[in-house]
Image: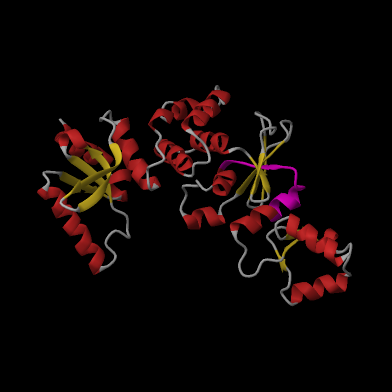
């Protein structure tokens, strides 16, 4: 019987309920295992885990699904994280609410750090991912994008394509399937611009600023090779020999990184290119000046 419990726990991804444990263990044994840290309590009452250390996202999500009954479907940002294209900062995503879909007649309700939504589109297309039922990647990306801010729409679609869990055609079909729902029109409008070569959400947000302003679409990860050297640019307009780079906080963390970055910049300058560098402050707060700067050199 103990082996049966071990197999059940393994099948459920390392989480189980107190009732399941008590079918083969006494209440005293359950308390003993918890006291000795062989089992750990999760965020959800009466659900335990065999995981060591802090409760990570997968343990929390699996425990929540089991606590809810196990037949609901992960959706929104929870599904995006399961598929690998949640564009939120790690600390925000780790502590964020979990989202699940239920029947269409279910009342939308929020529990502690948990949302349960009625599904107007149904859940017949749900697939298994990391031991959980969740919405398919293209549907997930479209739902997350249409409920997010304008600046995050392209970043979400880029991230979904980068994981190769879906294609642009699947994103287009997902938008068509959600036609009439709030926010889907603005998602459908940028699907054609989505590109899995974007290497970070901030790079995508910067590109969206340029596209939204009506500037020509740049090439992504443009590569220039000469004299035995090869370098890439985040965004490039080769006909104007103009490049735009997003510099994150880690761009110049060490003396060696700073020296390499300056050497690279000078190399592009020697080839007749102009490189413009932008940060998160430019993308979020000074985007009009950023767009004007690029537009001036493209004119």
**38 left or right of 275 in image:** right
Q: In this figure, which colouring scheme has been used for the structure?
A: secondary structure
**Residue drawn where x is 36% and y is 41% of the image:** 205
Residue 45 in view here: no
**154 left or right of 127 in image:** left
Residue 274: x percent and y percent?
15, 44
Residue 223 in view here: yes
Q: How many marks?
A: 0
Which residues lie in the magenta part? 63-76
Q: Is residue 71 magenta?
A: yes
Quarter that holds the N terminus:
bottom right
**Residue drawn where x is 15% and y is 51% of the image:** 227
Relative to 137, say whether 278 is above or below. below
Asked which quadrant contains residue 272, the reply is top left
Quarter that holds the C terminus:
top left
**Residue drawn where x is 54% and y is 56% of the image:** 94
Residue 176: x percent and y percent?
54, 23
In this view of the protein, which residue sits in the foreground, 149 or 243?
A: 243
Residue 35: x percent and y percent?
75, 76
Q: Residue furthest front?
A: 228
In this view of the protein, which residue sits in the foreground, 37 or 282?
A: 37
Residue 218: x percent and y percent?
27, 35
Relative to 94, say whether 245 is above or below. above
Relative to 49, say whether 80 is above or below. above
Q: Is residue 193 magenta?
A: no
């Amino acid at each position: 019987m103990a082996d049966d419990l071990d197999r059940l726990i393994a099948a459920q991804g390392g989480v189980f309920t107190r009732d399941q444990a008590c079918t083969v263990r006494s209440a005293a044994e359950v308390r003993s295992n918890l006291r000795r840290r062989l089992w750990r309590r999760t965020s959800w009452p009466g659900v335990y885990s065999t995981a060591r250390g802090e409760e990570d996202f997968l343990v929390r999500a699996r425990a929540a699904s089991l606590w809810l009954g196990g037949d609901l479907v992960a959706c929104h940002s929870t599904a995006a994280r399961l598929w690998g294209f949640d564009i939120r900062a790690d600390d925000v995503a780790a502590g964020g609410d979990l989202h699940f879909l239920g029947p269409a007649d279910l009342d939308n309700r929020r529990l502690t750090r948990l949302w349960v939504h009625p599904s107007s589109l149904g859940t017949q297309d749900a697939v298994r991912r990391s031991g959980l039922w969740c919405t398919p990647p293209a549907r997930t990306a479209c739902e997350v994008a249409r409920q997010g801010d304008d600046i995050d729409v392209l970043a979400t679609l880029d991230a979904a394509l980068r994981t190769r869990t879906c294609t642009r055609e699947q994103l287009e079909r997902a938008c068509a399937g959600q036609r009439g729902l709030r926010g889907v029109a603005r998602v459908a409008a940028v699907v054609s611009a989505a590109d899995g070569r974007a290497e970070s959400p901030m790079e995508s947000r910067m590109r969206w600023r340029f596209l939204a302003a009506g500037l020509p679409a740049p090439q992504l990860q443009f590569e220039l090779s000469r004299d035995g050297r090869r370098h890439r640019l985040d965004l490039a307009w080769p006909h104007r020999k103009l490049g735009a780079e997003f510099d994150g906080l880690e761009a110049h963390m060490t003396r060696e990184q700073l020296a390499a970055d300056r050497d690279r910049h000078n190399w592009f300058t020697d080839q007749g290119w102009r490189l413009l560098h932008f940060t998160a402050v430019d993308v979020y707060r000074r985007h009009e000046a950023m767009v004007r700067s690029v537009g001036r050199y493209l004119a």
